[in-house]
């Protein structure tokens, strides 16, 4: 079940923001465990190399590549490097993204542009450049990362550009899925809820938690109907399923991995 032998997986943001497991890092390692050759792309060499070292230490196959997925020329170059090294691309995971707080009045135009580029343009560019190769394999799969921030808004802590761009990911996914439905490429989204990834200790604690990690973690856990945040492996397993041949009749849709948040009464 869920084997990826003989497949090449192009994973963006395959490192993680700090020690521990981010969604892209866990996805890259899990896909390698399932037999895929992993092209681990990150804009920080040390992050990509750490993931590759983990995969190789477990006997898997992976290569690190440094690129910024918001830059079209670097995306084109990365796709060419993957195809040249591994002979094609079967799976594209658009994992790069992240949030920046601010509402309609408080967010600057520059930060709006930056967020749209980071969360939406990045996925568009990777789809654009990888598509011919995914189609050539006859059974390509794209998995995009959205966020619960696309489905539920906070009155006191708006993230207008993050929410809009992650909602955009849902539409981008459906558009690509329909465009490619008869060309052999599936496209789906994973929607993470509140996850306990390095993001929490490395950025959110500073942004939201007044530097009190324990209090922030307890607050985030309490917001989840299941009583605790998920982790990067919860996301990685959903991505793996959607990328696998077991999901061969699934396209243009999403899996929400949020411990019940989106089903709960606010
Ligand atoms: N962590 C969460 O709680 C959470 C919740 C909802 C959604 N998500 C989504 O999951 C995805 C992954 O989040 P995460 O927190 O695991 O990631 P992360 O912040 O740990 O980042 C993963 C990697 O992306 C790399 N990266 C950043 N900008 C890049 C760029 N322009 N080009 C190439 N690489 C770049 C970083 O160097 C890092 O190694 C994102 O799309 C995020 O929006 C995360």
Image (tube, rainbow, N blue to C red):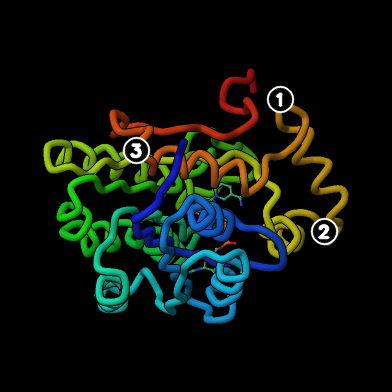
Give the residue at x 48% y 58%: 97
Per the image, the residue denoted by label 2 is 210
**Local crowd at mark 2 within 10 Å, few (<14), some, or many (≥20)?**
few
Per the image, the residue denoted by label 1 is 225
**Quadrant location of the C terminus in the rendered image:** top right
Per the image, the residue denoted by label 3 is 245
On screen, residue 4 versus residue 187, left or right, reads: right
Give the residue at x 31% y 76%: 85
On screen, residue 67 versus residue 30, left or right, reads: left
Residue 261's place in the image compared with 200, above or below, is above
Do residues under tags 3 and 1 come within 8 Å of each other at their CB atoms? no
Q: Secondary structure at mark 2?
A: loop
| Residue 186 pos. (x, y %) | 26, 41
Which comes before the other along the chain, label 2 or label 1?
2
| Residue 92 pos. (x, y %) | 34, 55
User: Who is closer to the viewer here, 235 or 201?
Assistant: 235
Q: Could you tell me if residue 256 is visible in this image?
A: yes
Give the foreground label among 3 and 1: 3
């Amino acid at each position: 079940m869920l084997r990826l032998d003989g497949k090449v997986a192009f994973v963006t943001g395959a490192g993680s923001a700090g020690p521990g497991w981010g969604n892209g890092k866990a996805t890259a390692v899990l896909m390698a465990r399932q037999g895929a050759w992993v092209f681990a792309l990150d804009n920080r060499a040390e992050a990509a190399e750490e993931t590759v070292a983990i995969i190789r230490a477990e006997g898997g196959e992976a290569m690190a590549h440094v690129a910024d997925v918001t830059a079209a020329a670097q995306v084109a170059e990365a796709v060419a490097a993957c195809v040249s090294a591994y002979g094609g691309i079967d799976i594209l995971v658009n994992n790069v993204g992240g949030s920046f707080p601010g509402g309609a009045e408080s967010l600057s135009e520059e930060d709006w542009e930056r967020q749209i580029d980071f969360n939406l343009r990045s996925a568009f560019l990777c789809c654009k450049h990888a598509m011919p190769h995914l189609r050539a394999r006859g059974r390509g799969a794209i998995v995009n990362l959205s966020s619960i921030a696309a489905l539920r808004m906070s009155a006191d802590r708006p993230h207008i550009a993050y929410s809009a761009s992650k909602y955009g990911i849902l539409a981008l996914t459906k558009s690509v899925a329909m465009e490619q439905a008869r060309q052999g490429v599936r496209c789906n989204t994973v929607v993470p809820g509140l996850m306990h990834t390095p993001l929490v200790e490395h950025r959110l604690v500073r942004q939201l938690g007044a530097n009190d990690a324990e209090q922030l973690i307890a607050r985030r856990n309490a917001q989840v109907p299941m009583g605790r945040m998920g982790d990067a492996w919860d996301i990685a397993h959903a991505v793996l399923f959607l990328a696998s041949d077991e999901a061969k009749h699934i396209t243009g849709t999403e899996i929400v991995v949020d411990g019940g948040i989106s089903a709960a009464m606010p």
